[in-house]
Amino acid sequence: MAARNTAYLLVGLLALLHTWGVAALVEVKMKDRVEVFRGDTASITCTFTSSEGVAGIMIQWFFVTQTGDKQRVFYQDPTGTVVDKGTPFTGRISVNGTGATGAIVVTISNVQLDDELEFICLVNGLTEGTGEGRTKLKVFVLPDFPTIEGEQKGISLKDGKSKIGTCEVKNGFPWPNITWYRNTAPLRGAPDVLKVVLSTTVESSGLFSVKSELLMKVMKEDKDDLFYCEVNFFVPGGLRMTETPHINIIVYYPATAVSVWVESPKGNIKEGDSIELQCRDNGNNPSSILTISDERGEHTIDSNVLVLDNVTRLNSGVYQCASMDMDTFEEISGNTTVFVNYLEPAVVVPKGSVVVTQGKELKATCNALSSLQTQIVWLKEGKAVSKGNSLILKDATFDSAGEYVCVVNVLEFVGMETSGTLHVEVQGPPEIMKPDDTEVEESFGTTVDLTCNVRGFPTPSVTWTTSDGKILPPASEIASWGEVHSVVSIKVTSDITAFCNASNDFGTDALTYNIAATINTTTPATTSTSISTTTTTTATNTSATVKAETPIPPKKEGSGFIIAVIIVCILLLAILGSVLYFLYKRGKICGRSGKQDLTKDKSSKDNIVVEMKSDNTEEAVLLGVNGEKQPPSHQGGAYLNVQK
Ligand SMILES: *[C@@H]1O[C@H](CO)[C@@H](O)[C@H](O)[C@H]1NC(C)=O
Ligand SMILES: *[C@@H]1O[C@H](CO)[C@@H](O)[C@H](O)[C@H]1NC(C)=O
Ligand SMILES: *[C@@H]1O[C@H](CO)[C@@H](O)[C@H](O)[C@H]1NC(C)=O
Ligand SMILES: *[C@@H]1O[C@H](CO)[C@@H](O)[C@H](O)[C@H]1NC(C)=O
Ligand SMILES: *[C@@H]1O[C@H](CO)[C@@H](O)[C@H](O)[C@H]1NC(C)=O
Ligand SMILES: *[C@@H]1O[C@H](CO)[C@@H](O)[C@H](O)[C@H]1NC(C)=O
Ligand SMILES: *[C@@H]1O[C@H](CO)[C@@H](O)[C@H](O)[C@H]1NC(C)=O
């Protein structure tokens, strides 16, 4: 029973002790850390709970030294506030609040890197015991903008891990991190192809600088890659990131192919052109040398360009461009075929000029050697007379004579053409061109110009004579290429016959002019000086000229035919008349009346009745059907009186 009572007492004491103990503790709450930029003001808050109020407590602030000791910065008790002298915070520390609200805020102005310490807030109650809180002060400094430096030298594929570039970020706090990127992907791992060498420095200011060097084994594909660094660093309340500018690197790689081509002119090349050949290999190799050569040897080229001026067909051929790696002496090459088109001068056969006899045939050819298809056309006086290379003049006439030009042009090239000429002379006897008229009427005393145009080859000689053998000197004579234009002036003193005689080796031709001299009369001028259109060949006189005018009926078309029909009808009627007369005479002898018989014969199929008159003038009348007399107007042109 006693033990049971003792147990109850113990439990009750424990419970009492427990409640008393809890009430006696001072509870202090603080943030784990306070983060500020260097130079800023840090506020560290210490929150506590105490039933005793400010009057019964003492608050002390310490910081933890490098060695782990606690050093007091300031304290507060009910008598007042004291800032300890000789601490790093003396003069920079201030306290806000009295603690009456259960919170006390310590502010440290112009925070320095060394201020990154742990602070302790210690609260002592007179009866309630002690409470403690701790806060770490974190100081931050933004680093300088990061820099990147790329490798300026080209990197060869043969090299091992080569330096790509260096990134540096200075004066940060705490340590900033540098990460390398290629294009958009971070470069990590792969120790056989890449290596990042990091070097860190603590500046005298206490700030941190980081340098990162990237070493990598490059591939041909890396020639276009972009490299850069990303810098990560902490700031109060978070993380921040910056990037360096992007760089690329020069990758040296050997060529696997060479191409050579004609850069200009584009398309076909012709003699006289300047051609530019260019050569390029697909590598990037400083130790490779390009050379261009053709069958005739090597050409000196300026960088990768070869210019050939005024090319001829001899420049045609295969041009080879070689790329030689001077380190390994490996050579690769490519080639291109150049073809220089040409058009030689036109060759005309026969050459120069040719003489063809009138009426004969002339064949000429024109050819120009060309590498391309040509088109040939023969022109005379600018007009095309023949297509193709041959010119055939069948049955040559004086009109065929002249200059023929054959033009040869290349279809593919505008303006690539050549031409040749052929002078054709047609030889033959003189041929005088007939003037409009050779019959001339002129008044006495006037002077008349007679013209004689002659063609013929060799160029004929022209003489003018009169019928009495007198030679007339020409007033003018123009002779050229088988043509003569001769004019004489004759004073009209009487009727004159003038001859224009033309001759050459092949024959002669003559033209006769008849000039009729007239006396001026008072007759109207209508017929006086007009040139006669008659066929008279002898000298005539104005008044003697008779114009054989034939009166023509208005109805021109059918009248000739009608007249012929009528004449035939009349002849038939005459014959019929004679027959009838003969029958009449015979009938008289036989004692019968032919007239009566005839009129009675109504069944006669011939419906034409002819009435004969006894007088000498025979008048045949064409009668209508059944002998009815038709009025003259009725029959129109079919009614005619004929007088014998
Ligand atoms: C002290 O605290 C009061 C109110 O809590 C505030 O208005 C004042 O700005 C503070 N002073 C300092 C120096 O922090
Ligand atoms: C830097 O890298 C280290 C190791 O990976 C990491 O612990 C740290 O948090 C990083 N710092 C920043 C600012 O990213
Ligand atoms: C081009 O070459 C031809 C023949 O080789 C020559 O007659 C001509 O004068 C040259 N022209 C130029 C512009 O050099
Ligand atoms: C030119 O190049 C072709 C392949 O591109 C090759 O077959 C030919 O033999 C080459 N010719 C010369 C003359 O080098
Ligand atoms: C000129 O021609 C005419 C006509 O043919 C002829 O009668 C005359 O004799 C010729 N004269 C000369 C000089 O040949
Ligand atoms: C004849 O008449 C024409 C005009 O009708 C005139 O021009 C000419 O001079 C005359 N001749 C003579 C000789 O009278
Ligand atoms: C022209 O003819 C007329 C008569 O018909 C004649 O009188 C005259 O003399 C003739 N004139 C000449 C120049 O022959």
Image (cartoon, rainbow, N blue to C red):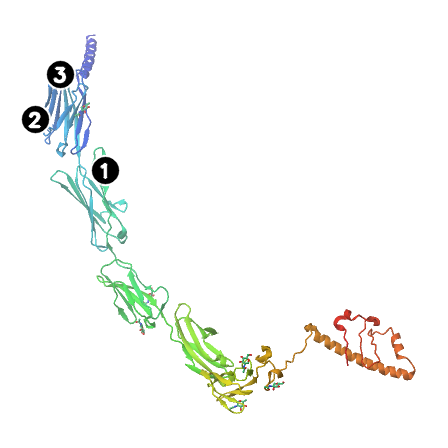
Residue 165 lies, with reference to residue 418, above or below; the image says above
Residue closest to the eye, 505 or 228? 505
For label 1, the residue is 240
Taking the image as shown, residue 469 lies to the left or right of residue 555, namely left
The percent position of residue 509, horizontal first and vertical second, equals 52, 87
Residue 152 lies, with reference to residue 316, above or below; the image says above
Residue found at the very far left of the displayed protein = 86
Residue found at the very far right of the displayed protein = 591
The structure residue drawn at horizontal position 27% and vertical position 45%, both measured from the top left corner, is 185
* For discs 3 and 1, the disc positioned in front in the rendered view: 1
Q: Can residue 430 be seen in this snapshot?
A: no
The percent position of residue 620, horizontal first and vertical second, equals 80, 77
C-alpha span from label 1 to label 2: 38 Å
Q: Secondary structure at mark 3?
A: loop
C-alpha span from label 3 to label 1: 48 Å
The percent position of residue 612, horizontal first and vertical second, equals 83, 78
Q: Residues within 10 Å of mark 1 (few under 14, many from 20)?
A: few
For label 3, the residue is 126
Q: Earlier in the sequence, mark 3 or mark 1?
A: 3
Residue closest to the eye, 628 or 30? 628
Residue found at the very far top of the displayed protein = 1
For label 2, the residue is 85
Residue 426 lies, with reference to residue 469, above or below; the image says above
Residue closest to the eye, 326 or 462? 462
Residue closest to the eye, 558 or 427? 558
Tell me the amino acid under the disc marked 1: Arg
Tell me the amino acid under the disc marked 3: Leu
Residue 119 lies, with reference to residue 571, above or below; the image says above
